[in-house]
Each structure stands twice: as C-alpha cells, then as structure tokens.
Image (tube, rainbow, N blue to C red):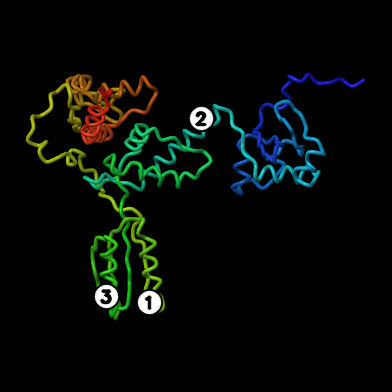
Amino acid sequence: MSLKQPMGQKVLTNVSVVRLKKGKLSFEIACYPNMVSAWRNGIEKDIDSVLQMDRVFKDVEQGEYASSKDLQKAFGNTNQQEVCMEILGKGEIQLSEKERSAQQDSLLKEICTMIAEKCINPQSKRPVTIGVVERALSELHFNAVITKPAKKQALEAIKLLEGKYPIERAPMSLKLTFPLKEKEQVRAQVIALEASIESEDEKNGMYSVVFKIHPEKYRECDSLAREYKEDGGTIEVLQLTVSQEGDASLESQKPAHSSSSAAPSSSDAAPPVRAAPADPAKPSEGFKSTTAPGVVFNTREELAVHSRSDWHRHNLKLKAAGQPLLTQEQFKEHQLFEEEMAPTKERERGGGGKPG
C-alpha cells in the first residue's frame, strides 16, 4: 500500500514559479530563483541550471503534476521538456510580495538614474540629481511596472515631469554635412526643427552645421541626411546630452532678486567649509558630524553652527527614515527645488479646499 502525501504539504518552496495559461487550464514549472531572467536575456545557456525538474505542474506549491490529458489538450504534445521550454519562454514569473517590491525598487532606481542622465534644470542647464527625480516622481505617485522596459518608462516619466517641475530633456548636439549648393535649404530645415545653431563651416564644397536639438527631433534630422546621402550628406552625434558642466555653486540658479534679499540667519544657513590652517597643535582631521557627509569643520564653533542648520535637521530626518544623507551640494539643490516648487504647491493648497 503506497503512502499518500497530505494535500496541505508544500513540496517545493525555494523556487521561482513560471505560469502559463492555456484557455481555462493553467500550467506551472519550477525554476531556480533569479535564473529565468538570465535565460531569457541569453546570459544562461544551460537549461539544467534553470529548471529544477523537467516536469510540468498544475500547482508547484502543492506538488501537483499536470496530467498528460491536459498537456495534450493545451499544447498538442505530452513531451515534458518541450512543454517546459514553451512555458519558460512565454509564461509569467510568479513573484512573492517581497520579491516584487524589491524588483520595483530596483527598477525605479534604474528609471531615476536614466532620467537624471537625460535631463537638466531648465534655469541652470545643469544635470538634475537622482534625488530630485526620486522626490518628483514620488509626489506624482509614479509606480514602476516590472513587466515594462526601464527605458520606455523613463521616457514616459520625463513627459510627466516636464512642465510640472524644473526638469526638461537635455538637448543633443549634432553635426550635419551637405553639399554646399544645398546650404540655404538645409539651414532653413534645421531652423524649422527649432534647433539652436552653434557653428557653420564651408570647406571643400561641403557645408557643415553644428547645432543643439531636442532628442525627439533626431529622426527628422536623420531623414534629412538620408535625402542627400548620395551627394555626401552625413549626420554625426557629437553629444547625446548637452548640459552645463563645472562645480559652480547652485546659488547661481536662484532668481536675480534673491541677491538683494536679507542674508539667511546662522540657524538656517550651512556653515562654509574652509581649508584647515596649518597648525601642528591642532588634530589634522578637524571636527566631523554624521549629518555632514564629506565635510571637515575647522573649529568647534563651525560644528555648532552646523548643528543648528537646516541641512543638519534635514539629514536627521533622512537618517531616522533610513534614507541616504545629502551632501552640502545636494542639500542646496534640494532647497532650490523646494523654492521653485513653492508657487505650484501653494496653488494646489489654495484650490484643494472643499467646495462650499
């Protein structure tokens, strides 16, 4: 007499389940964790490193196999390995809540990184930080979808951000070369694409123009070059993203009238960081604070001023929430971002009351 397994017993638990529905029937296979994506992306070639067993299940969690009758009806085939391969290629990965949350967080960071690489602040023309993008998307309640490519979601998110926040797509720099006889026509078409011409050159019977343009207009520029390909027309990408470089203070991004306003009090402003004087009697490491990453204060007075600053209080909140602390430059950009968003938030609060 054979022993029967209790129906509530979970035979396979440390697995990644892939499920495929065929009509009203559902089939599952048991795979090793994190190996399905590696197989689909062509990283893993050994199927034995992906499948835990060459069997098709009706319910992996309960250890219940699919019947040959169901396999024949759904796949027209009862070969276990062939059916497993089809499910592996077309099925949906079943994730636990913890795994799904971890994947969403990782995907969101990837999306924010892409946006930061592609966008600039329209006032300063400098790249936006990942932290600014994360806060903006959080306010818009943007959710990453793990079944969609990160690049596609990044481009969709940029369109949501533009106009609502001080963020815009960075222009790209292109160089078009055409026969000199086509100069006027080509130049007119480039201007019609709202391009910003930076330089023009005429040499050896050819006309070259370097300009900045919105990345969405690249296809039109490429089509323009193709029209004159037989006559030597070419297109060259000089820079994918054009932004203001350098370590200039972010204070330069503030409106001009702010320079005439009263200086901030010592309790609000972060203390300046100066080079420590060469004093052999004083410890070379100076004074440090856990809420001022990367900063060494010269005196105890500077450290005390920092402990009363907005930067210190903001980083204390981040630390309590388990989030990364902001450097001095990042905090200045955070302040600037909040200043630029203040009118928008004020309008939202003003129009958010209950109707009478």
Q: Earlier in the sequence, mark 1 or mark 3?
A: 3
Do the residues bearing badges 1 and 2 touch, measured as CB atoms within 8 Å? Answer: no
Q: Is residue 314 left or right of residue 106?
A: left
In the picture of the structure, the residue carrying the numbered disc 1 is 232
Q: Distance between the residues labelled 1 and 3?
A: 13 Å
User: Identity of the amino acid at label 1?
Assistant: Gly
Image coords of residue 278 (percent x, y): 18, 31
* Helix, strand or loop under label 3: helix
Amino acid at dot 2: Ser
For disc 3, the marked residue is: 183
> Which residue is disc 2 drawn over?
101
Position of 167 relative to 96 (above/below):
below
Q: Position of residue 296 (x, y in %)?
A: 25, 28
Structural distance between the alpha carbons of marks 1 and 2: 52 Å
Question: Which residue extends farthest right?
Answer: 1
Sequence order check: which comes first, mark 2 or mark 3?
A: 2
Can residue 27 be seen in the rendering of this structure? Answer: no
What distance separates the C-alpha of mark 2 from that of mark 3? 55 Å
Q: Residue at x 27, y 61 (%)?
A: 195
User: Dividing the image into 4 quarters, which one contains the N terminus?
Assistant: top right
